[in-house]
Image (cartoon, rainbow, N blue to C red):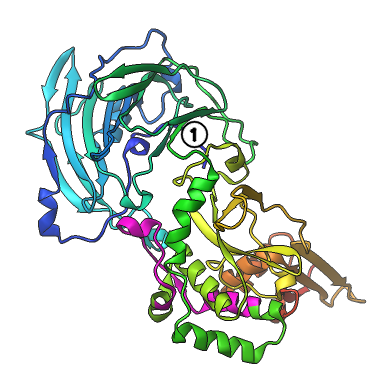
Amino acid sequence: MKRTSLHFASWLLTFSVLFYNTSAFAKQYEIDKPNEWVIHHNVKHPQKSDLEKVRDGTLYLLLDNQIYVPNRQKQQRYTRLAMKAINQSGVDYISQLSLDFDPSYESLILNSLTIIRNNERIDKLSSAKMSVIQGEPELANRIYNGSLSLNIIIDDMRSGDTLDYSYTITGSNPVYANKFSTRKTLNWSVPVVQQKMRVLWGKKTPLHINTINGATDIREASNKYGTDYSITLFEAPLLEQNSQTPTWYDPYTQVYFSEFDDWGQVVNWAHPLYQSAIETPNSIVDIAEGIKSNYTKTSDKIAAALRFSQDEIRYLGLEMGTNSHQPTPASETLSLRYGDCKDKTVLLISLLKAMDIEAFPALVDTEETKRLKELPPSASVFNHVIVTLKQNGKRYWLDPTVSYQRGTLEYLAQPDYGYALIIDDQNEAILTSMSQKPVHTNISVEDNFFIAEKASEPSRFETKYTYAEFEAINRRSNIASSGLNSVAKSYFEYYQGFLNGLSINEVMLTSEQEKTGKLVTRESYLISEF
């Protein structure tokens, strides 16, 4: 994910949460002053003018993020933003806020809500309209995290006003077993006058601090709460990214705070989560026995088990609370016939286990990909999990969330997310490269023109597309969702753009190459004006 501009929404903490009745929403937050450990900073105005680089009509005057991690009590995260609307676009952009939280393990306190106009502070806590609503930011991806949002509509907001607000969220997802990690971006492609980042560390265990893509001055002090780490930046230089930069590369400077010493600790954290869900009851064994009765080769059994987890279990993520990382038991996923990446992973591993085939979960990050190798150890950096195994000395990466995948194990399209952390407590816990040599050319095209002997007769144009790897998967998905007729029509309209007098000679035909997993489409047209 490339950061092209700084949006206030990126500062609002998003968490997974169980569904609640609307009548209960009103009691899910409080209004109170910040805790005494919070340091208040004055809002500063820019010394240099970069208003021509401002986006969305909003100049960020202060971005303040403070985190207190006590030894025994719950974590507290204080966030404060001061943003100036330099025009009407800015008014529209910042006059409505959404603060996301998870009341199953978090509490939200709105600390302040003010408008600064002509150096006068106007309190909006009593006049702003506030309501807690059900938020589902990943609904389009079939992921239900049940998040709640405190929606705030600010009245009497005018061009030139500065919105200054703050809030505190107490609590953290218990699935992390009280292990702390966080990260912060330190430079942006839009003007930010002042940034503050602070971690107040009250635990006895060491806190590891790393910066990526540059260095920053981190001040360390001691107080009654513990060790105080702080970062202050004033009018940091803007960073503009070239449009030709690879999608996996992120040039922005980031600071990481993590309680994890190494990737082995991440494996130790994840291993019991997955082992508790991998199981082989009768329902799993019955499916495995059915596969074994149809296939004799181990590689074919693996491919059949993968297809079952892909095609027979629909993708649906109910990632509320600890379910953000805790997989559902395999038998329950099989009964429900739906699950997310970790549920499908556990089911596939359980099916393979029932056939005496050893496989492991592999944690990956679909956004960081190759850059994951540069990042410090942390459990929170991963956003996806797949299955890995070795067969005849070769490692395979199997993604059970992929649909419409065909072919034998040797020809399966394998994902390449850069690096993966294999959850196997018996081997060395390191990041493993997923890089591999492609088996096929992704797309090959064969065009044939049959020229008529007489100018009055139409010529014939035939084209054959052979899709392999993920191109075949994507094309099958397109045909399944849109229908073959619709796809054929779009192809016909495409060729009409540069072939005069085109008409359809034969309907589009598709065929499958069972072993290689390739998809072949054939089209035949007549050209009256060749």
Residue extending farthest to the bottom is 293
Q: Position of residue 410 (x, y in %)?
A: 74, 71
Residue 336 occupies quadrant: bottom left
Coordinates of residue 301 in the picture (x, y in percent): 65, 80
Tag 1 secondary structure: loop
State which quadrant residue 157 falls in: top left
Name the outermost residue toward the top. 47
Residue shown at 46% from the left, 47% from the top: 379
Residue sitting nearer the eye, 415 or 203: 203
Q: Quadrant of the C terminus?
A: bottom right
Residues in magenta, as a range: 302-331
Q: Crowdedness of circle 1 by 10 Å Cα count: few (<14), some, many (20+)?
A: few
Question: Which residue is pictured at 52% across the width and 66% down the height?
Answer: 401
Q: Magenta segment: does it hold 109? A: no
The residue pinned by badge 1 equals: 4
Question: Camera-side residue: 398 or 252?
Answer: 398
